[in-house]
Image (cartoon, rainbow, N blue to C red):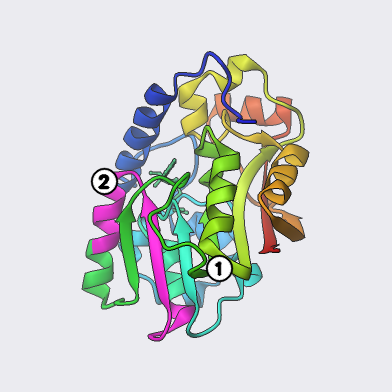
Amino acid sequence: MTTTERRLDTADLTERVKGMYQEVALHPDHDFHFETGRPLAERLGYPAADLDRVPAAAIDSFAGVGYFLDLAAIAPGEAVLDLGSGSGTDAFLAALAAGEEGSVIGIDMTAEQLAKATDLAAEGGIASAEFRQGQIEGPPVDPGSIDCVISNGVVNLSPDKPAVFAAAAAALRPGGRLAIADIVTAAQLPEGVTCDASLWAACIGGAMQRDRYLETIEAAGLEILEVRANDRYRFVSDRADDATRKYGATSISLLARRR
Ligand SMILES: C[S@@+](CC[C@H](N)C(=O)[O-])C[C@H]1O[C@@H](n2cnc3c(N)ncnc32)[C@H](O)[C@@H]1O
């Protein structure tokens, strides 16, 4: 089972997603279909004192959809994998929680996001965070090597969500956690929306129906422990807002554990 509709051109989609997040990395002050930056992070519940410890330029390009690091509860010494790490806000916060004995690997397919996160890690002396080019459907990490997989606003962008959750489960050690925020919908989206690559790149067109999303996680061998709604996330363009109202697109944060 994949979420790819027959008429969605996935190669075109990938290029559009890369183009969109290249802009977010290089020109975070531009207008997007979605909010970005520190005001968004604070509204979603990121503690200001934690954000103060992260390079400000990373937070400028923050494009997450919810707070979930309390669910992740990353402990000193843990190994963390961030799927779709963007400019690095969550990866840097995870690195601070994991400490010098821990490690964070951020995976992203957009070169400009990777370069920005890598430069900021070097400038900020955050040696335990490393960023690798890759696809979240097959991240370049050793199987069973990760204590906690995190991700924020990314899985909805993948045309193959079962592959993403299978890859997360494969990366985790038994008992390891998946803690993420993402967009899901109340109703299955019609093809007019799922085949619209710009709505997809704006985190709506690729959103999976909520129950199917949770079933897909369970089918990958993960037990869902907690799901909560992020009521403070909102879409900003009229088109995005329209799709949100029609199909009930919402942000959730969740915690699951590898069986
Ligand atoms: C909405 S942004 C979120 C970035 C970051 N998690 C944050 O909260 O700021 C989505 C990110 O996921 C990356 N991405 C999307 N689909 C991907 C895929 N299939 N494989 C790897 N990276 C992907 C994009 O390049 C982008 O940096």
Decide which of 93, 46 is in the foreground and name it.
93
Q: Can residue 52 be seen by looking at this rendering? A: no
Counting from the top left corner in percent of width and height, residue 195 is at 54, 18
Q: Residue at x 53, y 61 (%)?
A: 150
Q: Secondary structure at mark 2?
A: helix
Residue under circle 2?
111
Is residue 179 left or right of 24 when viewed as pictured? Answer: right
Q: Nearer the viewer, residue 27 or 81?
A: 81
Q: Give the SS element for disc 1.
A: strand
Q: Say whether residue 105 is magenta.
A: yes
Q: Is residue 124 above or below residue 57?
A: below
What is the magenta range?
Answer: 96-118
Q: How far apart are labels 2 and 1 at the CA level?
A: 24 Å
- Is residue 108 shown above or below 106? above
Residue 73 horizontal/vertical position (percent):
61, 75
Question: Closest to the observer: 135 or 227?
Answer: 135
Does residue 111 appear in the picture of this structure? yes
Q: Callout 2, which amino acid?
A: Ala
Above or below — where is 106 with respect to 242?
Answer: below
* Residue shown at 72% from the left, 25% from the top: 246
Answer whether residue 103 is magenta in the image.
Answer: yes
Q: Which residue is mark 1?
A: 148
Q: Label 1 sits on what residue type?
A: Cys
The CB of the residue at mark 2 lies under 8 Å from ligand 1: no
Q: Nearer the viewer, residue 103 or 126?
A: 103
Residue 248, percent from left and from top? 73, 33
